[in-house]
Amino acid sequence: MKRIMNMARLLLFLALAVSGYAQTVASSKEVEAVYPAARDFYVDLHENPELSSHEIKTASKLAARLRSLGYEVTEGVGGTGVVAVLKNGAGPTVMLRTELDALPVEEKTGLPYASKVHTQDDSGHDVPVMHACGHDLHMAALVATAEIMAHSKASWHGTLMLIGQPAEETISGAKKMIDDGLFTRFPKPAVGIALHVGNGLPAGEVGITPGIYNTNADSLRITIYGKGGHGASPQATIDPIVIAARTILTMQSIVSREVKPGEMAVVTVGYVRAGTKNNIIPDQAELGLTVRTYKTDVRKQVLAAITRIVKAEALAGGAPQEPLIEHYESTDSVFNDPALAERLRAPLEAAIGKENVITTEPITPSEDYAFFVEQGVPSLYMSLGGADPQKLAESRTSGTTLPSNHSPYFAPDVDPALRTGIKAEVAVLRNLLK
Ligand SMILES: [Zn+2]
Ligand SMILES: [Zn+2]
């Protein structure tokens, strides 16, 4: 008898636990009610991409939609940033972030809604523009989530803060929003949520990476000085191209010989600029580097090694002056709060199926979302599957890879990916705001 009682209590507990999560799940009726408008918005954004810091129409479209749903919307935060707040009684403030910007990439997907947009970039060059990173999908998901949350205020309480961040691709928009009072003019969130679509996971799945999610990124511009002259009279010159070549090769030993095996570090020289003509030795050479690491100490070690090698090679080559090393862009890795990641796993599983919530390895690209985390906003940054499941399976069998973000061929499998993004966001927000 006692055992039956215990069993009954267990069943009751399980039923309560399940219904607890069931309350966070967006019903298919809720999702389908907002889906057609979200998909139209996606197509509109995809056809009309705008470059970083120039997301003027994008921001105003997003703001108008959120305003029409009853959110208190502020535009022009940190440039073209949008902040939309919906207060719904006592409770925590939770932030959900989307990016606004597209990339100077010529779309080659062949989709009926492929971008044909060209514009002038900041240096006045004509460039094609494409949502090649999927930020259009993030905006569409956020708008649909905003609508579901606005129409189901009985399912949550607290303050929902949605932000549209400009200039993610230039690692500048998050900082600009913070400097413009994101966390002082508006409520400071107790928790932050973001996601990114990609072809690493099939559409329908969401990846969670507790702890370090992506890399520290550092952009360096190195100018090596020489002494120019006639290509036929090298004895009268100091050739900066030879010094640059040696510098590049010596830097290859940083990861292979100096960093502890197993630690993540990448040193890539993405461009070399020097010279104008075959028979002229130029008087300087420029290198552009990107450096990626997961850990702070490894990052310091690699940056110090680069500085040491650059200076030493210039000295060895007899350079007339010390090279100039400019550290012109950087961002820290995004840290996913491990306890938060574990807490949100259950509502995510309830929303999209246990088998569709995957624990994923940290990735090597970077993101300026880290600036929000550094302001003391514990966060979960999720990976949203974007690949056509069949194409992904085929590519895994054949050992090829699908087009990555930033590729002219990047085209997420929109319907399952967008629906999954909406379900994941609603589940997570309702859990945090219950
Ligand atoms: Zn990107
Ligand atoms: Zn992106």
Image: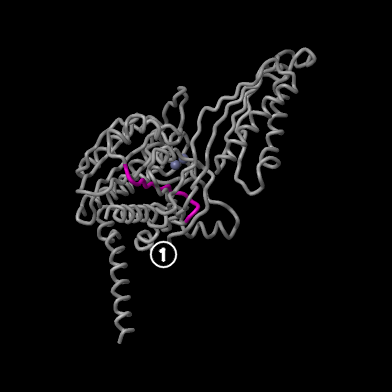
Q: Nearer the viewer, residue 285 or 326?
A: 326
Q: Residue at x 67, y 38 (%)?
A: 254
Q: Residue at x 37, y 56 (%)?
A: 420
**Relative vertical location of residue 66 with respect to residue 426 in this rendering, above or below:** above
Instruction: Report crowding for label 1: few under 14, some 14 to 19, many 20 or more residues within 10 A (C-alpha).
Output: some
For the residue pair 427 and 421, the one nearer the viewer reads as: 427
Front position in the image: 52 or 188: 188
| Residue 376 in which image quadrant | top left
Q: Is residue 196 magenta?
A: yes
- Please count the marks in the image: 1
Q: Magenta stretch mostly in which secondary structure?
A: strand
Q: Position of residue 79 (x, y in %)?
A: 34, 29
Q: Quadrant of the N terminus?
A: bottom left
Residue beneath label 1, please? 354
> Residue 340 location, x and y as percent?
39, 53
Does residue 70 appear left or right of residue 51 in this picture? left
Which region is colored magenta? 189-201
Which secondary structure lies at badge 1?
helix
